[in-house]
Amino acid sequence: AQSVTQLGSHVSVSEGALVLLRCNYSSSVPPYLFWYVQYPNQGLQLLLKYTSAATLVKGINDFEAEFKKSETSFHLTKPSAHMSDAAEYFCAVTGSGAAGNKLTFGGGTRVLVKP
Amino acid sequence: DTGVSQDPRHKITKRGQNVTFRCDPISEHNRLYWYRQTLGQGPEFLTYFQNEAQLEKSRLLSDRFSAERPKGSFSTLEIQRTEQGDSAMYLCASSLVETGGFGYTFGSGTRLTVV
C-alpha cells in the first residue's frame, strides 16, 4: 500500500522568496515519486520525478526536490518564487512492477504568490 | 500529436441523468487511465486499460460507472443515474506500457457538476 501526505494545504510566499512544499510518503515497495502542478481548470503537468537515480532531482521552471529515504520525504523547493508559480501542487507515489500501474496522490498544496 | 484530449471540458447535468465523457489518448500510448478529483483533493485512481483490456478497477468505481476502450484507442467513461457526489473533475491520462506511472500525460479534464 502507498500513501502521500502533503503538509499544509495552503502556502503563501512573497515574490522572490523561497518556495518549500512538503511531501512525506509511505510505501511497501521502493517508491517512485513525482511532483505535479495544476493550474485552474487544467490537467496535471509533471514538474519532476524521482526514479531511483540521483536523490536530488531537478525539474522544470527551477523546481527541485530531494528524496530522503531516512525521512520518507520528497520536499519540493524553488529558490525564488514567481507570480506564475501560483497554482496547486501535488506529490504522488507509485511503485515498480504491478504497483507502478497507478499513481497515489497527496491532497495538494495551493501556492499563493504575493507581489 | 496534440496530447491527451478530453471532451467535454464542462458538463452540467441534473441528478439522475446519465453522462458520458470521452478521452483520446496520445496515439502511440497503449495505456489509458481515469482519475477523479473532487474539490480540494488530489486525484484518485478509478481504472486503467492496456489496449482494449480493462486491467484494474478501483472500489471507487461503483456499478453506476462503466468505462470502455473498444478499439484500444479512445475511451469513454459513463456515469448512470448521476448523484451530487459525482460532481468532480474527471481526468484521463495515457502512457506507454514501458513507462507506466513514470510517463503519464494528463488531459485537461472534464468537470462534472450535478445539480
Image (cartoon, helix red, strand yellow):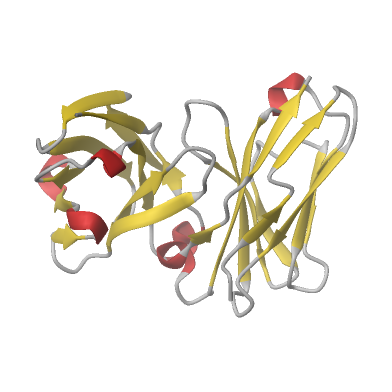
Tell me the residue at 83%/68% (across/down).
Answer: B70
- Location of residue A106 (image quadrant): top left
Where's the C terminus of chain B, which quadrant? Answer: top right
Image position, residue B33 (x, y; %):
61, 57
Image: A17 above or below B92: above
Q: Which of the pair A53/B15 is nearer the observer? A: B15
Image position, residue B63 (x, y; %):
82, 37
Tell me the residue at 9%/45% (across/down).
Answer: A79
Image position, residue A77 (x, y; %):
15, 44
Q: How many marks?
A: 0
Image: B101 above or below B26: above
In the shown orientation, is residue A113 left or right of residue A38?
Answer: left
Tell me the residue at 73%/72% (across/down).
Answer: B73
Where's the N terminus of chain B, which quadrant? Answer: bottom right
Image position, residue B68 (x, y; %):
80, 58
In the shown orientation, is residue B71 left or right of residue A99?
Answer: right
Q: Which of the pair A10/A87 is nearer the observer? A: A87
